[in-house]
Image: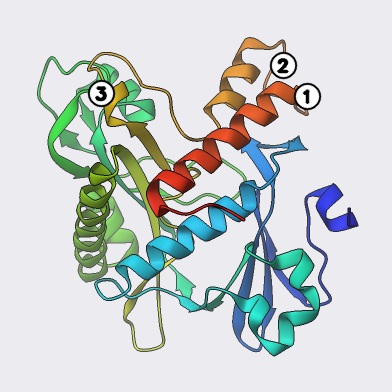
């Protein structure tokens, strides 16, 4: 096993643009090579354990959605299989199925979140205030109830700290009203388009986050990742019952283990047991296969 795979990081002989919690990003001739690792984060910490094949699932499922929506929503993808390009062929064993080559764009400092069901932080906020991001919601909603229509609930994008809810008006003040209107419209349309496809596969998308950038002409472009287990909450239709949250296809097994452990969430997190790693990997692979119809070879 390579040093990169053991450490969870990729130290390619390229200019490092950014090392995030999950992705290592390199700059190549004004473009970005984004490599998805097997690192897993929870409660704002990167854990010492890796989830085998997690990076491949994140990268390939995002590539699937970028291709599926490319005629409707402009995105940043230059090449979804950069290992086949001459400059990157020598690193094929490292980056195959893990990397995507994209345009380098100016990112908007917000996360565009669309919610179709009331769970997670949205549920906690609703219990306290009766609203989410300034949107007043009907009284008496139960946990995991579906909204009459998906709602747009943006947050700040904070590096190294918690993202904060913001109203649409605050978002417009931050990035400009015209940009805010366009991003809200794109986010809702994107969510509805992919949700309809997922339902045909027996999957509910409870919520999802998107990020956007703009090019030199000011055109708004979809960037980062879309509809992955790290950016979306997926449930099986057959498992859904209002009032309770169905099993999720993401790192919830990791979160649940940590919540039940003695870890104080203020110090370095502990390694994960083998069974938690295996179960988490299994869920990532399962949602990939359900949504794309293919196997991760």
Q: Disc 2 or disc 1, which is closer to the eye?
A: 1
Is residue 44 visible to the viewer in this orientation of the structure? no
Residue drawn at the location 47% of the way across and 52% of the way down: 157
Q: Which of the marked residues, 1 or 3, is nearer the chain's N terminus?
A: 3
Of labels 1 and 3, the one closer to you = 1
Name the quadrant of the C terminus.
Answer: bottom right
Residue displayed at 27% across by 17% down: 143
Indicate which disc residue 263 carries: 2
Residues tagged 2 and 1 counted as in contact (Cβ below 8 A): yes
Q: Position of 226 compared to 71: left or right? A: right
Q: Residue 83 is drawn in which quadrant?
A: bottom right
Label 1: state its secondary structure: loop
Q: Between residue 176 and residue 226, name the one nearer to us.
A: 226
What is the spatial separation of the Cα atoms under label 1 and label 3, in whole angstroms? 32 Å
Coloring applied to the structure: rainbow
Label annotation for residue 270: 1
Q: Please give left or right for residue 184 compared with residue 95 in the image.
A: left
The residue lying toward the viewer, choosing from 237 and 262, is 237
Task: Name the disc covering residue 126, or none.
Answer: 3
- Image coords of residue 73 (percent x, y): 28, 71
Residue 120's image quarter? Answer: top left
Q: Is residue 295 left or right of residue 19?
A: left
Q: Image height check: is 166 above or below 211?
A: above
The CA distance from mark 2 to mark 1 is 7 Å
User: x, y percentage for residue 51?
Assistant: 69, 39
Dot 2 falls on a residue whose secondary structure is loop
Image coordinates for residue 39, horizontal then vertical, percent: 70, 45
């Amino acid at each position: 096993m390579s040093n990169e795979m053991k450490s969870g990081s990729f130290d390619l002989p390229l200019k490092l643009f950014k090392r995030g919690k999950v992705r290592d990003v390199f700059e190549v001739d004004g473009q970005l090579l984004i490599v998805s690792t097997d690192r897993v984060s929870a409660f704002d910490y990167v854990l010492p354990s890796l989830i085998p094949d997690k990076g491949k699932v994140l990268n390939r499922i995002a590539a699937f959605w970028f291709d599926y929506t490319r005629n409707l929503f402009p995105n940043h993808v230059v090449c979804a299989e950069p290992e086949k390009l001459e400059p990157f062929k020598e690193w094929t064993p490292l980056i195959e199925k893990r990397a995507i080559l994209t345009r380098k764009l100016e990112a908007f400092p917000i996360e565009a979140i669309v919610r179709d069901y009331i769970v997670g932080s949205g549920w906690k906020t609703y219990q306290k205030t009766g609203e989410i991001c300034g949107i007043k919601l009907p009284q008496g909603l139960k946990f995991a109830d579906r909204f009459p229509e998906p709602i747009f609930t943006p947050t700040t994008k904070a590096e190294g700290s918690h993202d904060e809810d913001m109203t649409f008006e605050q978002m417009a003040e931050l990035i400009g009203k015209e940009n805010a209107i366009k991003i809200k419209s794109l986010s809702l349309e994107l969510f509805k388009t992919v949700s309809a496809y997922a339902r045909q596969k027996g999957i509910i998308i409870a919520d999802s986050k998107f990020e956007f950038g703009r090019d030199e002409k000011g055109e708004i472009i979809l960037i980062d990742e879309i509809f992955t287990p790290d950016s979306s909450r997926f449930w099986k239709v057959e498992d859904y019952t209002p009032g309770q949250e169905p099993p999720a296809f993401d790192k919830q097994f990791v979160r649940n283990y940590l919540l039940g452990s003695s870890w104080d969430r203020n110090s370095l997190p502990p390694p994960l047991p083998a069974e938690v790693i295996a179960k988490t990997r299994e869920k990532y692979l399962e949602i990939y296969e359900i949504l794309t119809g293919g196997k991760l070879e």
